[in-house]
Image (spheres, rainbow, N blue to C red):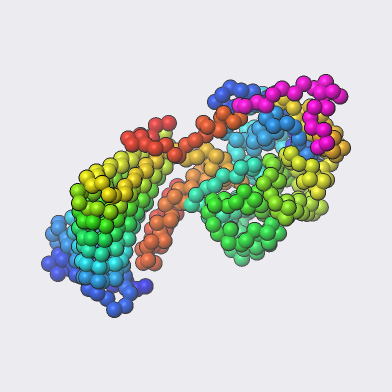
């Protein structure tokens, strides 16, 4: 699929209903204000690529009724702060993936408002934290209408003296019957000096719902290391292979080939 | 042709301070196929794992050398590169790691030039065919979702590709159906005929040994080599168990040592349900 880069009109992007499938890229460096809006037209089918999402902006992504598509976010800066609010109206289906393989520190705050009936969101994060990195991720789902669904899968690897924290919140308000909110966080801890932390939170004010959370923080499995090493891989190589295995799967959700390659080479360069 | 010498080896489980091997002496060379037998919990698997360098075990005294080189000073990967191979009883599932990527990496560490993709696929295809493993299994994650039999066959596939000097196989025949057992035995027979590989093979069943014809039989009891002999020992054990050893040789068989099973609980790592579970060691 080819990529087109949209230009903003007064810091607002409009993504229309497209005739042919195309990747639409939005580069936040093209904007002049801190607040940026992206509005997706009703019924649109889209693949939205967010470039320079980490440019210290606050982005509002509004998905109009029955829009369906993907959101692909790659963090490319060393010091980053992302603030993203996603509004999902009736019947919206959004599949969002965020990859963060660059060194540095930052706070990434994502808030999804499931406002419309039947709105669905799939959220994925893959984050690598190395050296002195300090990365904090907060993803929260706010279910305000019936029949909404949201699921997050956050995977991370922390090495060296770095910190990686995943905080996940699922909130279903009273009246949002038959809504489902799920979350799963997994952090692999490689070195004694690094810190991995996962905080799952569920706030449920309605009875007829489904909600779950799972959080796992653990060191790399010694049996796995032994197995790989017993075939001749050094400990370092074995750890690398395991890290790749942990983070690489997110790449399948990136449909823009150049960006995918860039991300892939970022993972490849890890020690 | 390599020679593996184990001298007066004492091994204990690191965390539990339980001694499992109590003075093992064993030499393997000359393209031998050594059958390693013994009751459950008497140190067979521990011996193989200790030779390969499993982190769970601590060598308290003794020596292991491969062609005169001190194996105990080597890292696990160095032991592999030196020519040792351990076909595991329970091969790990490693999520995310693609089987063929892993095999490529394992093959490349023992080559001067990296293997070409064409060559890799030629070898993979041939070995998969031989082991009756569907080729698409090599593109899946390492051992993840493999059946018990597929995992065992995958171990032999690795053996075929890596061509070590000494192949140690830990209950490679358990859980295999008749066809898979035949494929495993055929692969071993082929390696016996065409390479200079020596084998140290643990099995509880005479069937595999009938197929691959061991040159020597070693029986381990109470953490020691209690008896060495020819293939007739297998027939005897298969027919009348281990009790006859007590009668004929006066070897007392102590009860199964539970140590190994207790330890496996300590190897649990990822899988801690953890609100606020900070990553402490």
| B24 relative position to A109: left or right | right
Q: Can you give x and y, in whole percent of width and height, for residue B210 in the image?
A: 82, 46
Query: In percent of the image, x 24 and y 44: which residue is there?
Result: A204
Residue range corresponding to the magenta coloring? B238-259
Q: Is residue B139 magenta-colored?
A: no
Quick check: B274 above or below B7?
A: below
| B132 relative position to A45: left or right | right
Q: Can you give x and y, in whole percent of width and height, for residue B107 in the image?
A: 62, 53
- Is A138 or B248 nearer to us in this picture? B248
Quick check: B106 above or below A24?
A: above
Residue B248 falls in image quadrant: top right
- Is A69 or B162 nearer to us in this picture? A69
Q: Quadrant of the C terminus of chain B?
A: top left
Quick check: B55 above or below A5?
A: above
Q: Can you give x and y, in whole percent of width and height, for residue A225 in the image?
A: 53, 42
- Is B209 or B194 nearer to us in this picture? B209
- Can the viewer see residue B198 in this picture? no
Q: How many marks?
A: 0
Query: In percent of the image, x 43 and y 55: which residue is there?
Result: A248
Q: Quadrant of the N terminus of chain B?
A: top right
Q: Residue furthest front?
A: A208
Q: Is residue B245 magenta-colored?
A: yes
Query: In percent of the image, x 21 and y 60: which residue is there?
Result: A116
| A16 relative position to A187: left or right | left
Residue B259 falls in image quadrant: top right
């Amino acid at each position: 699929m080819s990529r087109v880069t949209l230009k903003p009109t007064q810091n607002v992007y409009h993504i229309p209903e497209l005739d042919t499938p195309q990747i639409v890229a939005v580069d936040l460096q093209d904007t002049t204000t801190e607040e940026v809006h992206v509005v997706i037209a009703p019924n649109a089918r889209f693949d939205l690529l967010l470039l320079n999402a980490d440019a210290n902006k606050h982005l509002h992504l509004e998905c109009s009724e029955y829009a369906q598509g993907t959101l692909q976010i790659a963090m490319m800066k060393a010091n980053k702060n992302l603030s993203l609010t996603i509004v999902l109206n009736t019947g919206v289906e959004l599949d969002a993936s965020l990859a963060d393989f660059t060194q540095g520190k930052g706070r990434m705050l994502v808030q999804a408002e499931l406002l419309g009936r039947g709105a669905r969101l799939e959220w994925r994060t893959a984050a690598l934290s190395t050296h002195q990195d300090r990365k904090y991720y907060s993803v929260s789902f706010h279910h305000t209408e019936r029949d909404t669904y949201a699921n997050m899968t956050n995977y991370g690897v922390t090495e060296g003296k770095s910190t990686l924290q995943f905080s996940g919140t699922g909130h279903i308000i009273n009246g949002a019957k038959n809504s489902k909110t799920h979350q799963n966080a997994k952090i692999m801890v490689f070195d004694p000096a690094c810190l991995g932390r996962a905080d799952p939170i569920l706030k449920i004010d309605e009875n007829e719902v489904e909600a779950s959370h799972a959080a796992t923080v653990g060191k790399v499995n010694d049996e796995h290391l032994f197995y790989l090493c017993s075939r001749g891989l050094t400990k370092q190589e074995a750890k690398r292979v395991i890290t790749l295995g942990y983070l690489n799967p997110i790449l399948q959700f990136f449909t823009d080939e150049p960006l995918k390659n860039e991300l892939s080479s970022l993972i490849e360069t890890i020690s | 042709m390599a020679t593996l010498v184990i001298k007066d080896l004492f091994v204990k489980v690191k965390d539990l301070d339980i001694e499992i091997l109590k003075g093992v002496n064993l030499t393997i060379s000359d393209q031998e196929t050594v059958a390693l037998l013994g009751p459950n919990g008497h140190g067979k698997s521990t011996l193989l794992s200790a030779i390969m360098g499993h982190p769970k075990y601590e060598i308290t005294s003794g020596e292991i050398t491969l062609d005169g080189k001190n194996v105990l000073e080597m890292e696990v990967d160095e032991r592999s590169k030196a020519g040792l191979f351990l076909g595991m009883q329970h091969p790990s599932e490693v999520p995310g790691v693609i089987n063929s990527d892993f095999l490529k990496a394992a093959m490349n560490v023992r080559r001067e030039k990296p293997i070409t993709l064409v060559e890799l696929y030629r070898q993979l295809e041939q070995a998969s065919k031989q082991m009756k493993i569907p080729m698409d299994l090599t593109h899946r994650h390492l051992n993840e979702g493999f059946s018990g039999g597929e995992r065992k066959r995958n171990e032999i596939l690795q053996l075929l590709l890596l061509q070590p000097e000494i192949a140690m196989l830990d209950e490679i025949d358990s859980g295999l159906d008749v066809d898979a057992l035949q494929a495993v035995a055929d692969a071993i027979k082929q390696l016996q005929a065409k390479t200079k590989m020596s084998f140290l093979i643990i099995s509880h069943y005479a069937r595999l040994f009938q197929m691959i014809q061991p040159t020597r039989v070693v029986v381990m009891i109470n953490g020691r080599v209690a008896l060495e002999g020819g293939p007739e020992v297998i027939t005897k054990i298969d027919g009348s168990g281990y009790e006859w050893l007590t009668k004929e040789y006066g070897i007392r068989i102590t009860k199964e040592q539970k140590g190994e099973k207790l330890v496996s609980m300590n190897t649990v790592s990822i899988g801690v349900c953890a609100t606020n579970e900070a990553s402490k060691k």
